[in-house]
Image (spheres, rainbow, N blue to C red):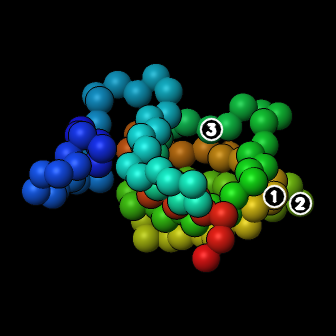
Amino acid sequence: MVSPDEQAGHNPVPFNLMGDIPAELTDELTQTLCNSASLRIERIVSKGHASESEFWYEQDEHEWVVLLSGGAVLQWSDGSFQSLAPGDYVLIPAGTRHRLEGTLADELSIWLAVFFTDC
């Protein structure tokens, strides 16, 4: 995949969020698609992945994330769980403790995550 920096000054090259995925995913695949001082966009690919049992995300920036394929379950610090199916999205305010309880083991879960500090 060619980064936006590598294609600067050239005609835009279309990318496919569902393509260019390794056959084996030992770890979650995270690719930064855009990065600036107040905005970061990532593609995340999971297959049976989950956060470590005691690990919690608690970011300084807001996160808007949409699940494009597969399935996932998020856990919130209050002990509640949220299942996500393709097309589901969630806005996670900065400082909100959350973790990935798990993704489908037999299907790719592809996410688009947008991290930002202000609107």
Numbered badge on residue 95:
1
Callout 1 secondary element: loop
Q: CA distance from mark 1 to mark 2?
A: 14 Å
Comes first in the chain, label 3 or label 1: 3
Q: Nearer the viewer, residue 81 or 7?
A: 7
Q: Nearer the viewer, residue 23 or 61?
A: 61
Q: Does residue 66 show up?
A: yes
Which residue is at 49% across, 34% downward? 28
Image quadrant in which the N terminus is located: top left
Image quadrant in which the C terminus is located: bottom right
Identify the image quadrant of residue 29.
top left
Viewer-nearest of labels 3 and 1?
1
Residue 112 horizontal/vertical position (percent): 44, 57
Numbered badge on residue 78:
2
Task: Tell me the kind of residue under disc 2.
Answer: Asp
Crowd band around label 2 with a 10 angstrom C-alpha radius: few (<14), some (14–19), many (20+): few
Comes first in the chain, label 1 or label 2: 2
**Residue to which mark 3 is pinned:** 50
Does 19 appear above or below 27?
below
Which residue is at 60% across, 69% downward? 90
Identify the image quadrant of residue 20.
top left
Task: Tell me the kind of residue under disc 1.
Answer: Gly
The single residue placed furthest to the front in the displayed view is 9
Which residue is at 46% across, 39% downward? 30
Which residue is at 55% across, 36% downward? 49
Numbered badge on residue 23:
none
Q: Are marks 3 and 1 in contact (CB under 8 Å)?
A: no
Q: Is residue 99 left or right of residue 11?
A: right
Q: CA distance from mark 3 to mark 1?
A: 20 Å
